[in-house]
Image (cartoon, rainbow, N blue to C red):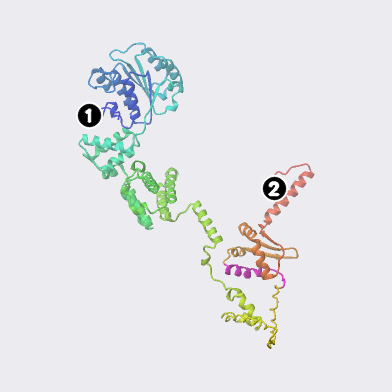
Amino acid sequence: MAYEVTATRKRPQLFDGLVGQQFVVSTIKNSIEQGRIAHAYLFSGPRGVGKTSSARILAKALNCEQGPTPYPCGVCANCREITQGNSTDVIEIDGASNTSVNDIRVIKDEVLFPPQSCRYKVYIIDEVHMLSTSAFNALLKTIEEPPEYVVFIFATTETQKVPATIRSRCQQFHFQLIPLDIIKDVLAQTAAEMGIQAEDEALFWIAKESTGSMRDAYTLFDQVVSFSNGMVTMEQIQQKLGLAGLDKISAIIGALLDEQTGSALQALHALLDSGVSVEQCIKDIAEYMRTLLLIRRDITNESILGLQVSQIPEAIRQAYSDEQLEAAVELFLKLYRDIRFSLNPRFELELAVSRLTHLRRMASSATLVRKVEELKESLLSGEIAQARPQLAKPIETIAPRAPVQQMVQSTPIKEAIVEPIVPPAPIPAPKPIPEPAPMARPAPQVEPLRKEVPPPPVSPPPIKHISKEVLPELIQEMAAERDPVGIVLSQVVEVTHDAKSLRFTFASNYAMETARQNSERLKALVARHTGYDGPIEFLKTLPKADPAQSEKRQTNELANTIATMFRGEVLHLQ
């Protein structure tokens, strides 16, 4: 980390102490050791990651009495002057305050004079992107051809605002955000050096709140130490800074899981009465739900989660699905945006918490569509046919056809149909007729065989007028055969029959298309029950015309006709 030594704690000054910037450290060290010192450097990156402090360390490395060296001693006169900020050869300029072209012209005049006591004259310009266009243009020529004893070090948080002509003439180093675990380790080491006891959870929270900035981490750590009395605990941080706390949020979510909305709202009111703001509650609950969502996605890295997994109960971690947690996070993110226009932000928070009671029963539109598709496939494949009520079986399925035809010879058809419950005893096969005797012997007296009377032909039922009353018979037979196409016939709204064709009108496109795909089976079924074997059409009901719309259309047509006759135009119609 690139931070100066203070009276309260000792911070590293050398490049080896830069935290999380290994690329910058290795490149600058190698360039100094090899004598490849550039005349201009551009340090870019987020705030608080060590850009300006690294520029000071580089100035020490170039001007140390033992250097140029990547390990400045820090005790020589030049190092001490640079550390104290009173070196005449290391000039720091705030680009946000000195933005005019006149300030740059002063630099152009000063670079003509060599350094007084140091090896290099170093110009450190912080927030260089704040310079005006004229100032950049005035600085361009100086950067392109500077004296050999001048080094420029620019620091910025917004590289895109620096002109490309300036960037192309500098060695660029991008500083990255520092990982959470590294910041936590540095804070633990700092607390040990200061003789302060700190809980692991408290240091984790400070590192998380710093969002990768070491400077913000040190600032927040100093604030916490000031009211901790030598013992940094998460409980003190929650009380002094007005935080919700994981245990309290877990209590609210646990009550919602048990559908105890009243208990959850009481816990929320207790949290607000303890001094936690509505905005902070919304942020903490949104972060809690985000952590649950990431855990469901198999993410266990605490630096990504932002919370320690062990502090969240197992029942809550397994309670919700991914879609439900996404809906909860979206709910609180939208709530945070909307509360500034609310009549009472507390009411909005109470309503959002109350809605979480039914979170486990929420389903997205994609899930509902998938369930409907699965149900349709199950209906068409017959997988859920067992759930339908058992219908009466037709006579043909109760008694096999072969015995009935044999009984026709001696029993009227009516009796065979009335008593089909007990299958008839099997008729023994006729004995083979013996072969005739040889001609030498007289032929035995054989009784002439009785000629069998063939069964009367079964003629198809006569063709009758077909109407909607025939549908129950057709549906009953399809259900007995476990044929899912029978479900389609239940959606027939009209049956018409004339000399040309038979027409079935359905209520939906799906039923009509399914009937067309199974037209051969339906045609055979209709022929068995009605004797009709002609063409069959499958139609869909048309939406009824709105009388008001029809009348309005006729009025518009009449008005247009009148306007055409009189060479006018229609301006307005009621």
Q: Is residue 468 magenta?
A: yes
Measuring from the top left, give residue 104's x and y in whole percent: 40, 17
Q: Which residue is mark 2?
A: 573
> Which of the pair 229/231 is nearer the observer?
231
Residue with the most extreme top position: 113
Kind of residue sitting beneath label 1: Ala
Q: Compared with residue 473, is residue 18 higher up or lower down, i.e. above or below?
A: above
Q: Which residue is mark 1?
A: 7
Kind of residue sitting beneath label 2: Leu
Residue 197: name its quadrant.
top left
Q: Earlier in the sequence, mark 1 or mark 2?
A: 1
Q: Which residues are magenta?
A: 462-481
The answer to whether residue 276 is left or right of residue 555 is left
The answer to whether residue 222 is left or right of residue 454 is left
Measuring from the top left, give residue 433's x and y in whole percent: 65, 82
Name the residue: 56% across, 71% down: 391
